[in-house]
Image: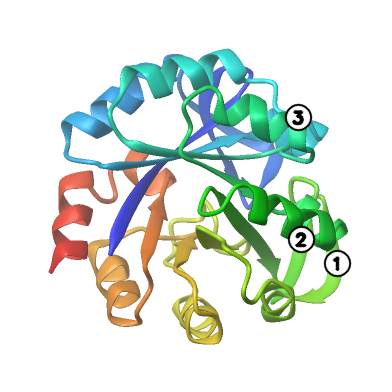
């Protein structure tokens, strides 16, 4: 199982939000590039970036800091947040990012998203953010009446790189992931599922790996020293 340490960008700084609430922001560093280099030095081969400004505003705004991060490390890097049109896809991939996570645009314009996946095979990730099993959009500010597994069903046979499945209730709460929901999604689809939200302890990583998840994103727990990156990588390997 892969481990993707997370860097959430807001105003060019590395922050974490509780349950996606912009009013509950903690700044961990004003130098995201240094954080990315630190993750690589600790053995990470993958890096998950989130443009929180972009998720909220509908267009990425941290292009230059993203470019700086990608140029500074030798890791597979993905970015989500505000990727809503082809021009943005082109511009972000041009920074050297390996893959992009799209959520709101996939839900609101499924035909367009399928077309983009065909045009950029293996480079686009379906981001499914769920609150009580229902898909949330627009930086988690809106909750739809579409079940998460139903959204996934709409993209069967599409050349997705993966699905990043985030459980909003557990995100940033340091209380463990929703393993049953993650396992259900992985069983439901035939593409790799990346678990996101609440991954806090070595035991969480082991449970997700045992449940068959392809990868896990770890954010706040790394910054709060609840788990170290080498511990997480070791647990995922074993």
Q: Residues within 10 Å of mark 1 (few under 14, many from 20)?
A: some
Q: Secondary structure at mark 2?
A: strand
The x and y percentages for residue 173 are 51, 55
Q: Residues within 10 Å of mark 2 (few under 14, many from 20)?
A: many
Return the residue at label 1. Answer: 144
* Up/down of 24 relative to 28, above or below: below
Residue at (42, 21) in percent of width and height: 69
Q: Secondary structure at mark 1?
A: strand
The answer to whether the residues at label 1 and label 2 have Cβ atoms under 8 Å apart is yes
If you read the primary sequence from the N terminus, does the residue marked by circle 3 or circle 2 appear first?
A: 3
Q: CA distance from mark 3 to mark 1?
A: 26 Å
The x and y percentages for residue 238 are 12, 69
Circle 3 or circle 1, nearest the eye: 3
Q: Is residue 232 left or right of residue 113?
A: left
Q: Is residue 175 left or right of residue 148?
A: left
Which quarter of the picture shows residue 107? bottom right
Return the residue at label 2. Answer: 136
If you read the primary sequence from the N terminus, does the residue marked by circle 1 or circle 2 appear first?
A: 2
Q: Secondary structure at mark 3?
A: helix
Residue at (83, 61) in percent of width and height: 111
Return the residue at label 3. Answer: 87
Q: In the image shown, does 42 or 117 lie closer to the viewer? A: 117
The x and y percentages for residue 66 are 51, 22
* Up/down of 183 relative to 5, above or below: below
Q: CA distance from mark 1 to mark 2?
A: 6 Å
Q: Residues within 10 Å of mark 3 (few under 14, many from 20)?
A: few
Q: In the image shown, does 103 or 42 lie closer to the viewer? A: 103
Residue at (44, 77) in percent of width and height: 179
Q: CA distance from mark 3 to mark 2?
A: 24 Å
């Amino acid at each position: 199982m892969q481990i993707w340490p997370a860097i959430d960008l807001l105003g060019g700084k590395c922050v974490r939000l509780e349950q996606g609430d912009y009013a509950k922001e903690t700044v961990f560093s004003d130098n995201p590039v240094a954080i990315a280099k630190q993750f690589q030095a600790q053995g990470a081969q993958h890096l998950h970036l989130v443009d929180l400004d972009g998720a909220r505003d509908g267009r990425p705004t941290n292009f230059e800091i993203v470019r700086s991060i990608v140029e500074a490390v030798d890791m597979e890097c993905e970015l989500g947040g505000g990727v809503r049109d082809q021009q943005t896809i082109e511009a972000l991939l041009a920074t050297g990012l390996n893959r992009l996570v799209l959520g709101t645009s996939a839900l609101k314009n499924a035909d367009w998203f399928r077309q983009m996946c065909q045009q950029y095979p293996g480079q686009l990730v379906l981001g499914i953010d769920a609150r009580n099993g229902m898909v949330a959009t627009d930086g988690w500010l809106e909750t739809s009446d579409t079940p998460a597994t139903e959204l996934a069903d709409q993209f069967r046979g599409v050349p997705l790189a993966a699905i990043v499945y985030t459980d909003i209730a557990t995100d940033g709460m340091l209380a463990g992931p929703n393993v049953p929901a993650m396992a259900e999604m992985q069983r439901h689809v035939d593409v790799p599922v990346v678990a996101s939200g609440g991954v806090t302890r070595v035991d969480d990583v082991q449970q997700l790996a045992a449940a068959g998840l392809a990868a896990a994103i770890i954010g706040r727990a790394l910054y709060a020293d609840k788990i170290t990156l080498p511990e997480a990588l070791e647990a995922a390997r074993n």
